[in-house]
Image (spheres, helix red, strand yellow):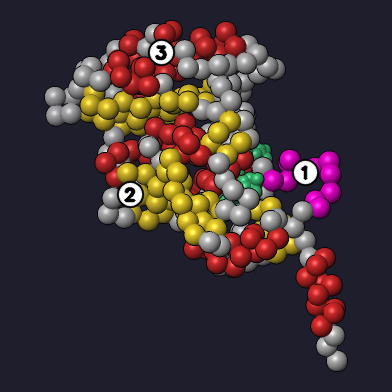
Amino acid sequence: MHDPRCRHEFVHMSSYIRPTTLQEAVEALAETRGVLLSGGTDFFPARVDRPIRETVIDISGVREIKGISIERERIAIGGRTTWSEIMASPLARGFDGLKAAAREVGSIQIQNFGTVAGNLCNASPAADGVPPLLTLDAEVELASATGARTLPLGEFILGNRKTARRAEEILTRVTVPRRLENAASSFLKLGARRYLVISIVMVAVTLLTDDRNRVREARVAVGSCSAKARRLTALEEAMAGEKAEAGIGKLVAAAHIEALSPIDDVRGTAAYRRDASITLIGRALEACVGAA
Ligand SMILES: Cc1cc2nc3c(=O)[nH]c(=O)nc-3n(C[C@H](O)[C@H](O)[C@H](O)COP(=O)(O)OP(=O)(O)OC[C@H]3O[C@@H](n4cnc5c(N)ncnc54)[C@H](O)[C@@H]3O)c2cc1C
């Protein structure tokens, strides 16, 4: 005969849950305050030297937060969408920079498993997905058992491995306003080698022009040069009204990168990172006007 105490014991000791709906997932998270596992490409490397004691909530079976949808005002990317899926989707040219970043995330195997939400929630200063999404004015949607909220990506990522995510929240979607979907965009990453590399500097640019081919709005973000990737608003303002043509990269000056606070580490010195970021921004701007 079934002994209810056995079930209680099982539930108490359970350390792995695999929900298949978002509702189940947020309820499991509220109940257990466990840790979320998506593609696992950041999760497992962070735990190689210690046993996993937390309750693991594996959301890899939650299909409703996967895929890309075009809505009236915004384009929504489900949090469980992988980098390979982003590369394969027919997104407008405003997403060329994000696609270029997707191609740079680790290797093909990593891109097949690694998800957008995992990249943003892990909040590495070198996360390739962050600069292009910052230049697309991305917002993140967070769901919990008690409701949902939306935050601009720039406010969601607080610092190195720090986000505004509450323990009971799941990042369900990243959305981008459609007014940027036809902007020119680019992404460049500098690493110590060509493939499977953590960046020394990375740069994303989104450029909206008017009918006289002048810059209406510029958005420039740099990663790996501060605790979190940053938009360079001084440069963005300086570029407004400039001609969107070859030579645009020359507008970048040392004063424009003052918001950055690069560190010296094994991958490069702070001075090198500053220097490289100016060069890379220039090239990313030229790429946006078809001159690189
Ligand atoms: C060999 C290798 C190379 C790599 N190279 C790069 C690189 O070049 N560039 C780069 O940016 N990254 C790189 N990464 C890191 C990683 O692949 C990416 O950050 C990836 O996008 C993480 O996604 P994931 O689904 O695997 O996240 P997971 O590992 O499953 O989770 C990462 C973190 O996010 C949390 N999380 C996951 N999903 C959600 C959600 N929906 N809501 C709330 N929290 C969530 C998890 O709890 C965990 O803390 C590399 C990793 C490896 C192993």
For numbered disc 2, what is the local secondary structure? strand
Q: Which amino acid type corresponds to the residue marked 1 in the rendered image?
A: Arg
Q: Main secondary structure of the magenta part?
A: loop
The amino acid pointed to by label 2 is Arg
Nearest the camera: 283 or 132?
A: 132
Marks 1 and 3, how far apart at CA: 39 Å
Q: Secondary structure at mark 1?
A: helix
Q: Quadrant of ligand 1?
A: top right
Give the quarter of the image for residue 165. top right
Residue 47 disc label: 1
| Above or below, 189 relative to 177 | above
CB under 8 Å between discs 2 and 3:
no
| Above or below 254: residue 80 | below
The span shown in magenta is 43-53
Judged by depth in the image, the label closer to the viewer, 1 or 3, is 3
Q: CA distance from mark 2 to mark 1?
A: 36 Å
First along the sequence among labels 2 and 3: 2
Identify residue for label 3: 256
| Mark 2 vs mark 3, CA separation in Å | 30 Å
Q: Which mark is residue 74?
A: 2
Q: Residue at x 85, y 78 (%)?
A: 6
Closer-to-camera residue (96/62): 62
Q: Is residue 253 above or below residue 87?
A: above
User: Label 3 crowding class (10 Å Cα cut-off): few <14, some 14-19, many 20+?
Assistant: some
Residue 95 visible in the displayed image: yes
- Packing grade of label 1 (10 A; few <14, some 14-19, many >=20) is few
Q: Residue at x 33, y 54 (%)?
A: 70
